[in-house]
Image (cartoon, rainbow, N blue to C red):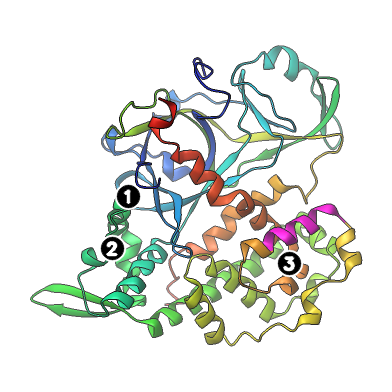
Amino acid sequence: MSESSGPIRLILAPARATPHDVLHLLPCEVEHNGSASVARYFTPAIRQGPQEKSVSFRGRSLKGQEVKVPQGYVGLVLKEDQRPCSEEEERMVRLKSTFAALTVWNLEQAPSADDGLLLALSWPGIAEAIHAPLSEKEE
Amino acid sequence: MQGSRRRRPADAQPDQWVLLAPESVTDLPMKPDDGPLFTRLRNPSTGEAALYLFNSRAQQLFEVKAFHEEYRSWFIGQAVQHDGRLLFATPVDPLFLVLFYLIKAEKEQGKFQPLDQVVVDSEFSTCTMLLQCAQVMDSLHHVVEEKEICRKKFYKYSQEKTLKWLKKKVNQTVKVLKSSNVSVGGRVQSATFISGKQITDVKEEDYVRYAHGLISEYIPEELSAELSKYLQLPELTSPEVDPPLKKRKLSDAPVEAEEDYTKFNSGLKNKKATSKMSAAQKALAKVDKTGMKTISAFFSAKPKAIK
């Protein structure tokens, strides 16, 4: 299995040519991929409270929090336009859009510090510590 | 998005991904074809396939992990994406991956060899790209004995040197862990407090044990055990292994995370440290929970699967 799953090339574009997207991580599964009238129905219903955002989605109350991507990082949406027919051809994904923040939504209760995603966002800092080359002093 | 429904249910073959990556990954290559490359390499701890990312010209290596909770989907701009995963590409020291092959060569041949004869793998042919990473040649001397014959260099794995190097890695990690405990601020502090132990209660040994656990994710189990001895980490006694039940009941999240962590840190009885440094560990547990398996399965679907 691993032998046949070849590498995937990331095709970049100049930053100014790459659009920004607004991302919402929903607390439910939507069994669909494709266009959705987010700006028409979802975004206008968002209310910014003193601590959290709230919105009604399909009759459920969602509470959300906007989080920035970790410092030095950038959010990327990657898209594979066409999967090659043969395994010899290199697969490609292109950079479709970027984002600097995302809103994570939970049902009923706003995401807390213990929330998985908020904790996961501290992983890059820890990874940096483990994998940085030894500093001069350590050498 | 158009056409994603043509011949498959949503996500049988995802064609769009959400990824957090260091900004440098998006630096434009000299030639468009030389862009970053996602590829599968051997996880140096398990020897199994895992997903990695080389930046343009293969100067740096990143590992790709997935954060994945059940019942999540994305709104991305004016579109919906069923697959609610968030991928992370974070730097990984490529020397760990090279070390895997050096140890293997030491076991199989046990002699001085040129590096390009050591880092070869018929199953993972892109592993030779590891030798292009600047960090590998700069730091190789930490883990090998070296001989030069007729201006060609030959290398042999040295456990003694490697343990020294790993100990420095542990120290470096401990330092960052300590300082990040301060700088990550209120959130982690409060989470630590919730877990039932005061932060002042954290001992040096706990940091070392924790850092050892982190590094052990990148080295074979045997070497991890050697490192534990080398660091003179005392064996944990059982009464301290299980935190009192009432602590666990304070929140659902830590319970789940502790369970994750034992998986994350397989082979290590690390519960004691967990109870004290839960926030950071939970972060890792959460990331790793979904980790490599999900993500590699995710990128590995073969073209022929959709024929």
- The crowding category of the residue bearing disc 1, from other C-alpha atoms within 10 Å (few below 14, some 14 to 19, many at least 20), is some
Q: Is residue A22 magenta?
A: no
Q: CA distance from mark 2 to mark 3?
A: 37 Å
Q: Which residue is mark 2?
A: B119
Residue picked out by circle 1: B58
Residues at circles 2 and 3 in contact by the CB criterion of under 8 Å? no
Marks 2 and 1 on same chain? yes
Residue A9 found in image quarter: top left
Residue B273 visible in the displayed image: yes
First of labels 1, 3 by sequence position:
1
> Which residue is identified by label 3?
B277
Badge 1: chain ID: B
Q: Chain of mark 3?
A: B
Amino acid at dot 3: Met
Quadrant for the N terminus of chain A in the image: top left
- In the image: residue A23, left or right of residue B12: right
| Mark-to-mark CA distance, 2 and 1 | 15 Å
Is residue B260 in the magenta section?
Answer: yes
Residues under numbered marks 2 and 1 in contact, where contact means CB atoms less than 8 Å apart: no
- Secondary structure beneath disc 2? loop
Given the image, on which type of amino acid does mark 2 rest?
Val
Which stretch is magenta? B251-261
List x then y, in percent, for residue B230: 52, 86
Kindly identify the residue that appears in the image at 50 percent across and 29 percent down.
B13
Relative image position of residue B20 (x, y in whole percent)? 54, 42
Mark with earlier residue (2, 3): 2
Residue at 84 percent across and 70 percent down: it is B197
